[in-house]
Image (spheres, rainbow, N blue to C red):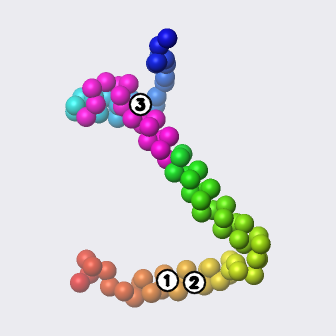
Amino acid sequence: MRSTQQFSITLPNEMAEVVRTKVATGEYATESEVIRDGLRALIARDRAVESWLREQVAPAYDALKANPSSGITADRVRIRLAAEHEKGKRTPKREDI
C-alpha cells in the first residue's frame, strides 16, 4: 500500500511564485517538498497552540473560576498598559543614543 497520496491544489499567484522561487534557488528540490514543509510547520504550530491551551490557558481559567477575586479588571489592565506605554515613551531607544 502506498504511503503517499497525490493532490492537485490551486494556489494564489503570489503563493505559487514563492513555491517556484524556493525550488529555483535550490532551497527545496521539488514543489512537493515546499508544500510538505509548510504543512509540517502548520502541524507544529497547531500542536504548540493545543499544548499552550491545555497547559497554561485551561489551568488559569480553572483557577480564576475557582477564585474570581484573584483576577483583575479590564480597567486595571488598561491602566497598567497605559503606564507601561508612557514608560516606554520616556525611555530613549537604542538608535536615539
Residue that appears at 49% across and 47% down: 45
Question: Relative to residue 90, is residue 18 depicted above or below?
Answer: above
Nearer-the-camera pick, 33 or 66: 66
Circle 3 residues within 10 Å: few <14, some 14–19, many ≥20: few
- Is any atom of residue 44 visible in this view? yes
Residue 8 image offset from top left, x and y in percent: 48, 18
What number is the disc on residue 36? Answer: 3
Nearer-the-camera pick, 34 or 50: 50
Circle 2 residues within 10 Å: few <14, some 14–19, many ≥20: few
Residue type (three-letter) at the residue carrying disc 2? Arg
Name the quadrant of the C terminus.
bottom left
- Is any atom of residue 8 visible in this view? no
Question: Relative to residue 31, is residue 59 depicted above or below?
Answer: below
- Front position among marks 3 and 1: 3
Residue position marked by numbered label 2 in the rendering: 80
Q: Are marks 2 and 1 in contact (CB under 8 Å)?
A: yes
Q: Are marks 3 and 2 in contact (CB under 8 Å)?
A: no
Residue 54 image offset from top left, x and y in percent: 62, 56
Residue position marked by numbered label 1 in the rendering: 84
Q: Which residues are magenta?
A: 27-45
Secondary element type, mark 1: helix
Residue that appears at 77% across and 72% down: 66
Question: Relative to residue 81, is residue 20 depicted above or below?
Answer: above
